[in-house]
Structures are given as C-alpha cells and as structure tokens.
Image: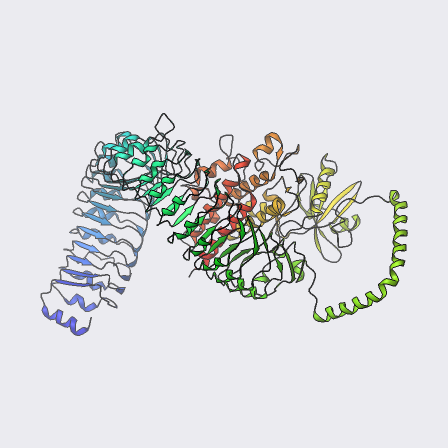
Amino acid sequence: MSTEGLGRLQGAGRRRWFAIFHHFLVNIPKEITSLPNLRNFSVLSSNLVGIIPASMFNMSKLQYLHLGNNSLTGTLPENLCDNLPKIEFLYLIKNQLYGQIPSNIGKCSSLRELSLARNGFTGFIPQEFGNLTILEGLDISVNHLIGEIPKEIGNLTMIQNLYLYENNLTGFIPQEMGKLSKLESLDLELNRLGGPIPAWIFNISTIQFLSLSANSFFGSLPPNMCHVLKNLQGLYLAGNYLSGNIPMSISNCSRLTIITLLSNEFTGSIPDSLGNLRQLNVLQLSDNKLTSESSSQELSLFSSLANCMLLRHISLERNPLNGVLPNSLGNLSSSIEIIYAFGSGIMGSIPGSIGNLSNLIALRLDNNQLTGSIPTSVKGLGKLQGLYLHNNIITGTLSTDLCNLRMLNDFNISQNQVSGSIPGCLGNITSIRYIDLSFNKITSSVPISLWNLKDLLELRLTSNFFNGSLAPEIGKLKAVTWLDMSLNHFSGNIPSTIGDLQRLIQLSLANNNLEGSIPSTIADIQSLEYLDLSHNNVSGSIPKLMENLTYLTYLNVSSNDLRGEIPSEGPFTKFTYDSFAFNRALCGAPRFHLPPCQTISRRKSRTRKTVLIAIILPGMLSVVIVAGLGTVFHRYKKKSKIPSQTGLSSLIEQPRISYYELLQATNGYSQENLLGVGSFGSVYKGILNDGKILAVKVFNLQLERAFRSFDAECNILRNLRHRNLTKVITSCSNPDFKSLVLEFMPNGSLEKWLHSENCSLDVMQRLNIMIDVACALQYLHHGYTTPVIHCDLKPSNVLLDQDMVAHVSDFGIAKMLSEEETITHTNTLATLGYIAPEYGSEGLVSTKCDVYSYGIMLMEMLTRKRPNDEMFDGNLSLRGWVCGSIANAIMDILDVNLIRSNEEYATQELECLSSIMKVALNCSKESPNERSNMEYALAALNHIKLHLLSCYRRP
C-alpha cells in the first residue's frame, strides 16, 4: 500500500474497518496506528513479514484484530493488553511469533475469542488466562508450550472451544476444568499429559468433540460413559495406555460419527452394540488386544455394523480377533470405503459377498491366516484402489476377474501360495502403480502386456518360478523405480532396453539363469542405487561406462562367468571383493583379492613365451614324465613317515608363524594383551617383529571340547572367504598348543559398542553393521556349496575393523550341512538368550537357528537391552517386550541414543527403526518354518537403508 493511499485513510478520520484479503504487503505500516477510530483490522493470508508494530496494541478502540496466516515474527509486548480495553477478537494464528505469551493477556478482559495457534510460543500457559471470564474460544495449539494446564482455566465458564493440542504440556487435566459447563470442543492431543481421564469430562452434556489422543492417559473408561454425553459426535482417544473393556453403553452416544480408540491396551470383546450408532462414519479400534464377541468363530461385529448405513471406514488391524469373516461382510453400508483388518489372526476364506461393497477403496487383510482363493466376486469392487492380501495362505490362481478393478493402484499378494500364471489383462489396468507377487508359486512367463504399464512404479516378482526370457518391451516401464525379479528361472539375455528405465533406483535379477553380457546401456540409468545380477551365467566384461553411475551404492555381480578388468572409478572405489566374488577371470586392484590386470606389454611378453614353450615343450616332455613318476614313487615310500598337518594349510599364502614368534608377539600371552575370553579359549593382541598387528586365538586344551572346536574352525574356515567373515591368516598347532592367527579388529566387538558407556552408534552405523552381519549369514547359508550354520551368533562374536565394517567370528561350534541335509543335531549348547527354541529344547540345528539369533541381536542393537537382562524373567522376554511395544510405544523401547527429537531426520529414522524391528520379529518367530531367511532379511534391510539414504539426500 502506498503512503498516499494511507494518507487518504487518515484523512477519513472516522475509519472503523480496515481489511485486506490475499494481497501482498511487505510489512505492517506503522502509520496504520494513526487511525484513532479504527475498530476492526484484518489482513489475512497476505504474506506480511516483520514484526507487529508495538503501536498497534495502543489502539484503544480496536475490537477485532486478525493477522492470521502470514509470516510475522518477533515477540508479543509485555504490555500487550494495557491499551486494548475493548478488544474482543484477537487472531494471530499461523505466523512465526515466538517467546512467551505475556501474562498481561489477562487484562484483555473483553476477549471473546483468542487464537495464537501455529506459532513458536514457548514457556508456560499464563495462569492469567483465568481472568478472561467471558472468553468463548481459546486456541493456543501447535506451539512449544510446556508445564501443566493451569487450574485457573477452570474460571473460563463461558468457554465453548478449548484447543491446547500439539504442545509439550505435562501433568494431569485439572479438576477445576469440570466447571466448564458450556464446553463443546476439547482438544488436548499430542501432548505429554497423563493420569486417568477425569470423570467430570463424561458429565459435561454439551461436549461434541473430545480429543485426548497421543498422550499418556491410563485407566479404563467408565461403564456409563455415555449416560450424559448425548451430544458427543467425535471421540478421539488414540495413542494412550487405556485399558479394560470398551463400555457397552457407548451406543448411548447416539450422535457419534467418529470413534478413534486405536493404539491403546483395550481388552475384551468388541461390543456388538456399536451397530446401534446409526450415524457412525469412522470406527478405528486397531492396535489393541480386542477379541470377537461371537461364541462361534465368525466375527459377529461385521454383522452388527451392517446397521450403520453411513459407515465409511473400519480399522480393526492388529487385534487378536482370531475369527472368520462372515458372509454378512457384504451387508455393510454401500458407502464403506476402507476396511483394515490386517494382522488380526483372521482365518478361513474371503467371503464371496465382498463383491457387494461397490464403493470400497482400500481392503487390507494382509498378515492373517486366510486360506482359499481370491473370490471371483472381487470384480464387483470397481472403485478399489488398494488390495493387500500379502502374508496369508491363499492358494489358487490369479483370475481374470481381477482385471475389472480398473482403478487399482496397489496390488500386493506376496508371501502366499498362489500358482498358475499372471493374467495378461492385468496389463490393461493403467492406474496400477505397485505390483507385488513375490514369494508365491507362479510358474509362467511374464505376459508382454505387463510391460505396457508405463506409469508402474514398483514391480516385485521375486521368489517364484517365472521362466522365459526378459522381453525387450521391459524398456516401456518408463516410471518404474523398483524392479525385483530375483530368485526365479528367467533365462536368455538381459535386454539392452533396460537402459530406458531412467527412474530406476533398485534392480535385482539375481539367482536366475540369465546369460550373455551386461548391457552397456545399464550405465544410462543415472538414478540407479542398487544393482544385483549375482548367481546367473552372465559373461563378458563389466561395462566401464558403469563408472558414471553416481548414486550406485550397492553392486553384486558375484557367481557369474565375468572376465576382464573391474572398473576402478566412480562408485567402484567403494565396492569390495564380495561384489565380484566367484567369477572366472576377473582382474583388478589388490583390494579385490584378484589377480592384477595385464598391460599390453605384459601380454606381448606372454605371447613370446608361448612361442618358446611351443618349440621347447616336445623335447622336454619325456624328461618331465620320467621325473614325475620318480617323484610319485619317492613320496609313496615316505608317506607313512611324514606327520599330517592340521589346520588351515590349504589357505595359507604367507609363511607360517611359529609358537615362539606368537609368544614374543603377545608378550608371553600377558594380561595386558588379552582382548577377550570365549567358550574355548582366549584372544590376545600380538605385534610381530615387522610391526604387523594380529589377533591370536589360543584354545584352552584343558576344556573337553577345545580340540573339537579348533578342528571345527579349521575345517569350516579353510574354504570360506567373505568380506564380513573374520579373516584367518594362519594356524599354529602341536599336541600341546593350538591357536588361530586372525586379522586384528581395532574397534573391538559389537558388544563393546552397544554396552559401554563411552561408545555410541548412530542409526546409519547400526544399520550398516546389521547389513554386514546379514551379508555374512547370507553367504554362509546360501552362497557356499553347502550351508554353514554359525550356531552362536551374538554381539561379542561380531568384530569391527578400522572402518567399522562388521566381521562375524568364532566358528568353534559351527556346523556344516551335507548337500542332502537341511537340519542336524548337536549336543553343544550355545549362548542362552540368543539360542532358538528348537535348538535349546531338542538340539535341532538349521540355518533358521542363526536367523533367530540374528533377530534377537537386531532387537538388542536397537534397544540396547541384552536378551538375558534382569528385566526379562519367565513372564517377559526381549522379543515379547518388543512385540508388545512396537505398535504404539516404540519410543519407550528404543535406545535413548537413537531418539533425536526435533532434528531434521528424526521422523524418517523412527520409521526405519520401526521397520527394522519388524524384520527382527519376523526373524525370531517361535516356529522355524515361519521365520524369514537371510536373503529376505538382507533385502529388507537394504531397502530400509535405501529409503533412509533417499531421505538424507532430499533438500
């Protein structure tokens, strides 16, 4: 506004109203206060900046001031209300004001509505609010206020709407607030309030909306809670510690439209009387311990809710319902849009009547025990956008009826027993963005039509029996970011059109029968972060152009037939031997543990040598044969006189280290050099004469199983080679002394880093260590000729090198299965707390025992609680503690060093930690058949890491 225009306003002299809507002002002109008769001043959503002129609070006739939804900064003056005797409406909502709310606010005794919400106010709520006795509305939500709710709030007897949500308020709700007899809306959610919900709340008949969610309230709801609350429309009590039954009398709150009781500790049956709430729109009861009321297995709640003709949303997930979906499910309101009942122990088949719910948008029945096939009646769900049936026991085939779901966006039926083929018409659902058919028994090729889904974002087909070749049309998936087709029977070449997938972040074609070369066009996928082509028959060289893949953080081309030089620039500077292991003829830098690549001059020299050998060889051949026969005869005669050497002789490339060298290196195995003590011996730090630092594991031969432990380690480690296994350099053995010489790990054990006061690991460090250990176990279980079971996985057996890379150690009780075995027996007991149930009770050992130990270790890494901590007795275990808290109290179980409040990435990190906990729970299930395998766990953790890294990279 120009000064000239403002002058005209001043000239008016009697101006009572000034309003600007949706116009731009740099700041509030100080001259505005020259309008002595101004009563109403409103500048909404006008990009105002700067501070509010102090003189504005001296306009004695001002009754209405609205500066909401701007970018005003600064603090409110201490004398805020000294010269505003007539102010009735004061709205400063949604600005950037800070500091404390002045106690002087109590002098604005004419105030009827006050809103300071969505700013940055700090400090306590002024008790002087109690002087505003005619106040009808108070909103100070979404600030940083602390302390208790002052009891003086009880003096606001005229108040109708009270909003204090999203602050840091603590303590109890004061009893004095029971005098607020005109209260219609009370919102205290997202604070840190606690105690029982006061009884007076249920005696204020005017209340229409009550929100106490996301606090720490406990206790039960009164049986007669709705005797007085006849006007209640919205009940929000989610995210507390409320327990007991949901009162039957809740149906007396006949105007209820929304009930949100999720993430509490309610028990007992869900009352069928909820069906009497004829105006109910939303029912959220998830994450409790509720059961079904029916005496039969059928979930009668769905029958009773058929009376709620306005019902749109039902959330019952993660309750132990343990029942069967009734056919009356199809009688629910035709307006129903969302049904969530995942993780609730639901059994039986999906009723055919579900096709009646023609307005359904999202159906989540995953993580249950559903059987049978997907009913053909799903074709009636024409508006369905999300169909989630994963992790059940669903069988049958995917019928063409699914193709009627023309609005489908997300289709997940992974981890079932679905067989047959993918219907070609699925490629006609152009709205679809996510398809997950992984971990099933599908046996067809991928229909060409599927590659027409140009807007598809994720396609997961891993762990099926897909066959055939990858069609060139795969390049049509222009929007795809995640493509996982691993663990199938795909054959043929990788099509060059793969390079057209310009948005691809993760690509896994591992464990197939693919052949041919790696297409150079793969280097065109600049967004690529994860690439796994391992365990195929891919040949040729690694394209040097892949050095341009700036974001590539994970690469695995191991177990193929690749040859030639490994690229050395770009992302390849970060990769290790594991990325390229088990190929025929690769060469590269020494850190890859591969032969160096030959230069041109060396290749010419080799050619000349070949010519000379061709000339000389025929003449020498007869001499070699005679000499060879003589040597064999000589060795045969002396064989019985030469003692056999135990240990790792087949592995050793360095000179052996004698007993006396080890004695000198460890200063006589002194206490100062002791690094740790294990079940069968001790580990010492040793320094050789050339300055090389080693770790020397000396077996205590007084122990009965020490000899067997030494032999076991030698036998197993002789042929194992992996970045995340502790490297054995050599052994020293005679009848009275046995030791292994190991690579020294300067950062010690994971045990030290988890449980020492002076050590700390952040989220990404812990995640990297978890992935390292998972890589080691995946190699032991799936990457070697025969499965190797560690049998004693725990933090003290995970060592950290100078770069904090984790190495699994101590194979003293490990077992190697034969090719025919999947399970074996043992009498050797591992460490209590980490030991799988079947191992401890029956001595049954399989790879799933390591998976169990890994799951327990994941929980220990995130909670910093050992499984044998004193808090865990016969009634509570580490797993039980995590399982009971992950849904609504994960912050209570996490290591406090991982909780970074008010930091930039705290929310994303908390999501990732929750996802890791779910991986841990899947790994540590009671039944070995229900546990994940290490390939699945590793893939899940890599996915979590990618998600977290993408969050860190966002501006």
Depth check: give the residue in front, 414 or 400. 400
Q: Is residue 335 above or below residue 767?
A: above
Q: Is residue 158 left or right of residue 756?
A: left
Q: Where does the image place residue 860, in percent across and percent down from the top left? A: 53, 42
Depth check: give the residue in front, 388 or 946. 388
Depth check: give the residue in front, 372 or 847. 372
**Residue at coordinates 27% horizontally, 57% vertically from top-left?**
94
Among all residues in the image, which is located at the extreme bottom?
4
Q: Is residue 168 left or right of residue 712?
A: left
Q: Where does the image place residue 445, in percent across and percent down from the top left? A: 51, 49
Q: Is residue 501 above or below residue 439?
A: below
Q: Is residue 932 above or below residue 944?
A: above
The quadrant of the picture occupied by the C terminus is bottom left
Q: Where does the image place residue 913, in percent across and percent down from the top left? A: 47, 47
Q: Is residue 467 visible?
A: yes
Q: Is residue 695 left or right of residue 501?
A: right
Q: Is residue 366 left or right of residue 809?
A: left
Depth check: give the residue in front, 599 or 69. 599
**Residue at coordinates 24% horizontally, 46% vertically from top-left?**
162
Q: Where does the image place residue 642, in percent across and percent down from the top left? A: 86, 45
